[in-house]
Image (tube, rainbow, N blue to C red):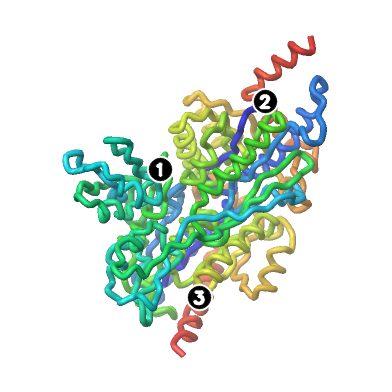
Amino acid sequence: MKQLVVLSGKGGTGKTTVTAALAHLAFQDLSTDLAHPRTHDQRPLVLADADVDAANLELVLDPTRQEEHKFMGGQVAIIDPEKCTTCGICADVCRFEAAMPGDEAYRVDALACEGCASCFYQCPEEAIRMEEQHAGMWFCSDTRFGPLFHAHLFAAQENSGKLVTLVKQHARLRALDTGAALVLVDGPPGIGCPVISASSGMDLALHVVEPTVSGVHDLERIMGTTDHFGIPSLVAINKADLNPARADDIAAFCAERGVEVVGRIPYEDVVTKAMVQGHPVTEYTNGPVTEALRDIWEGIKERTLADRTDALEEVTR
Amino acid sequence: MKIAVASGKGGTGKTTVAVSLLLSVANLPDAERPTQLTFLDCDVEAPNAHLFLHPEINTRETVGIQVPEIDADTCTHCGTCAKVCVYHAIAVLGTQVLTFPQLCHGCGSCSLNCPTGAINEVLNVIGTIERGSAGPIEFAQGTMNVGEPMAVPIISQLKQWTIPPDASNGPGGTANDRPVILDASPGTACPVVESMRGADFVLMVTEPTPFGLHDLRLAVEVARDELGLPVGVVVNRDGVGDQGVDDYCQAEDIPILMRIPLDRRIAEAYSDGETLVETLPEYRAQFKNLYAAIERMVADKKGKHAQ
């Protein structure tokens, strides 16, 4: 079993569009694997949406929810106004400007509180308790391409990295249970904590980049991040014809770093049209966008599942 | 007046709008131009505004958090530090104390609780804050070091060091009004909350697609419902998708303050680092109107508070 995460430093470069298309293509490809006929419970693919604060993969996969679970996030300090003597020690020790004088007693701004419990330990009146927060939900759903693990972090909650890890762990366990060949993870934007959580343990990262000044700048940062954690990279250039010269610059930059560019997706309205209709673009059209995405899938397959294909050929022979 | 520019979904045009908005205000005639214009790039994971504003950077400071350093001579290996650390950033194994700076939030609880005073706090650098200017605009950005997980401390330092203390005073288009634009990161988690906290207004840039709408709802939940801030929407790439964003804004009584049609010229200019108002100067007037509309909404909100 191999795990692939789709990333981009900059947001909105097409991670989810690419992930949904890869889910469709991988499902088609791996399901026609006649040497290993599969039942519904043994589909070749498990999906995970690791963008837990703005999860969009479900919008194009039409999932049927099968399980939902509460996610308990970090703690928040709560001051008992009856016990508070307004000594102010909590505010003195709080480094997040969360504890402050209120009307009669001190109070804690839950949005600023990092749950460190420093005030809890220092309050001489024992007026502070720490309360675990119901910070979100996580789900297991069924889609036409395989099970999807996804989540919703409630507004302004912390610990997105922890929730990402949870979603990924469940996807991986399902894949191991059912003998799936691939776990496909739609990553969050940026390079920080949720991205690091989404990347950990992955066999390969596919960076979706657009040929813009920002895209190039952020590719360097995200590739630096995955390199730092020892995860091999592939690159797909989205909207490549928007600025062909800059797309070539990206290709040159990748070549210099020994990273393969596995495809160039043209800039076309059909991508948005497919999204509005709620379909992966490869299901919606057979045009140049789909052709480019097929190339990308082939590139990924070669890099991740090659050993397995060899093994299959052995079996077939 | 502090205006945070956010979106939920990435790549909807936050930086495009934030940069062009401030450039349009900077372009006002002297009598109308605010005395001070500040741009803060709070997307410390992927800061891009500098690629469009080309600021001249004149100060560069590192930013970090205070992490524990254990003095082996005074440490009695009692394990209190590990017990009080909710982030599991300290482990005591026999006579060894291990610290994990990347898990540490710098709360200082370990050193406050150490019975022998064996913990010193030392700065663990996680990023940089750069300040400079781009013409009349004072510019600052935070950049998180690659491999670091925590963006919030950098954003909070960036705000603390660069926002004029009286930035929220004087809404209503007077000369002492000092606009500060905070360009936030995508998403709705802690870095976005930190960028919005303390703002007077949140400008949501979205695109009229199912992804845009889905994430706009979440961003509004944070800005309006959790933080109680007034919000307004800019619809970018108008005409590309469906009616969802319009219907939502109408139902929720959120004003759509500006529309930027889908135009390949804008996308191409962006790809080369050109700003919208440089490429298509006819947008300047619209951005000035957008700024005036925001000023009015902020003044209204303050008026209501005063009553």
Is there one chain holding both mark 3 and mark 2? no
Judge depth for marks 3 and 2 and give the one in front.
Answer: 2
Examine the rendering and report whether any part of residue B212 can be seen.
yes
Residues at circles 1 and 3 in contact by the CB criterion of under 8 Å:
no
> Separation of disc 1 and disc 3 at Cα?
39 Å
- Tell me the chain of label 2: A
> Separation of disc 3 and disc 2 at Cα?
53 Å
Dividing the image into 4 quarters, which one contains the C terminus of chain A? Answer: top right
Name the N-terminal-most of marks 1 and 3. Answer: 1
Disc number at residue B148?
Answer: 1
**Which residue was labeled with disc 3?**
B292
The vertical placement of B169 against B136, above or below, is: below
Q: Residue at x 40, y 51 (%)?
A: B86
Q: Secondary structure at mark 1?
A: loop
**Direction from residue B111 to residue B53 in the image, left or right:** right
Return the x and y of residue B163 as percentages of the image width and height.
34, 65
Classify 10 Å Cα crowding around label 3: few (below 14), some (14-19), many (20 and above): some
The vertical placement of B158 against A141, above or below, is: below
Q: Residue at x 45, y 66 (%)?
A: A110
**Which residue was labeled with disc 2?**
A301
Q: Residue at x 42, y 78 (%)?
A: B171
- The residue most toward the left is B73
